Image: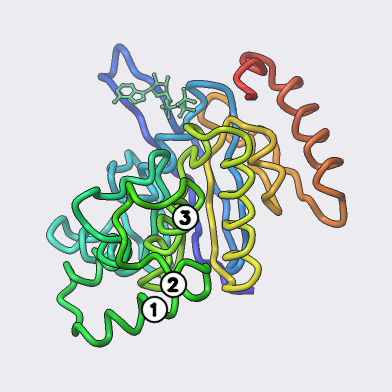
Amino acid sequence: MQSILKIENLKKYYGTKNNITKAIDNISFSVNEGEFVGIMGASGSGKTTLLNCISTIDTVTAGKIMINGNDITEIKDRDIASFRRNNLGFVFQDFNLLDTLTIAENISLSLIINKKNENKIDEMVNEIAKRLGIEGILDKFPYEVSGGQKQRCACARALINNPKLILADEPTGALDSKSSRMLLETMDEINKKLNATILMVTHDAFSASFCQRILFLKDGNIFTEILKGSKTRKEFFNEILDILTLLGGDVQDVK
Ligand SMILES: Nc1ncnc2c1ncn2[C@@H]1O[C@H](COP(=O)(O)OP(=O)(O)OP(=O)(O)O)[C@@H](O)[C@H]1O
């Protein structure tokens, strides 16, 4: 299977020689096309730093991050934004929908920035909206639609440019349990039906139980990795809780 993301000996240090924080000590792993992978770990274990490095938001101290065969640590500053727009999709905690734009405009923002042809944009928006069941609300504004529809809009926006990799940072962090479940089911759907490759950082064992594989970080290293395999989601959830207990620290963070 083709690896979409390949991380080799990644290091990210903060501070100076005498006062150094090894946010990422030495991490290597791959994510294959069509995988839904979770990143878990106690507070301060390096999850956000890892995601920021993969998102090209942060620079690395050492190591390689290959996305679809390109080492993003070597991309020139002026090319970073377009690489991000063309290869990555993001699902944020608060969805970041702009209230002054319609749902259709929110979904197509990156295409508008990329100066794609207007008819082509309409076609792409209609197609993704249909797949996510929100074709009826495209002309509405975010404040006129339900929370679940907003989530679907956020997923449609993350998917519109057919990104190689979708990055989600605590996407359910601000949601109640019903909305969390709906978002996770949508993510599961885009993973299974549209073969989207997803990497999701989460504190939450319930959210993580939707993944096929979970990497647990501890002090900037990979502590362990577990696979869902043929386990039920409930069995996988219990296994996740066991590992969080083993990891110690902040099991209370599991919402
Ligand atoms: N800009 C920064 N400058 C200095 N140290 C930093 C910086 N960002 C993160 N760190 C440190 O790097 C380590 C990893 O932080 P990171 O935010 O990646 O952890 P996390 O697992 O995402 O935590 P949380 O779950 O609380 O968000 C921590 O010790 C943190 O204090």
Q: Earlier in the sequence, mark 2 or mark 3?
A: 2
Task: Please tell me which residue lies in front, 147 or 120.
Answer: 147
Question: What is the quadrant of the C terminus in the image?
Answer: top right
> Which residue is denoted by mark 2 in the rendering?
135
User: Mark 2: which amino acid?
Assistant: Glu
User: Mark 1: which amino acid?
Assistant: Asn
Point 31% across, 60% down: residue: 140
Task: Please tell me which residue lies in front, 126 or 166.
Answer: 126
Q: Position of residue 168 (x, y in %)?
A: 47, 47
- Residue 126's tag is 1
- Look at the numbered disc 3 and give the secondary structure of its residue: helix
- Look at the numbered disc 2 and give the secondary structure of its residue: helix
Mark 1 crowdedness (10 Å alpha carbons): few <14, some 14-19, many ≥20: some
Figure quadrant of residue 35: bottom right
Q: Is residue 58 left or right of residue 94?
A: left
Figure quadrant of residue 155: bottom left
> Which residue is denoted by mark 3 in the rendering?
149
Residue contact between numbered discs 1 and 2, judged by CB atoms under 8 Å: yes
Whether the residue carrying mark 3 lies under 8 Å from ligand 1 is answered with: no
Residue 192's place in the image compared with 63, above or below, is below
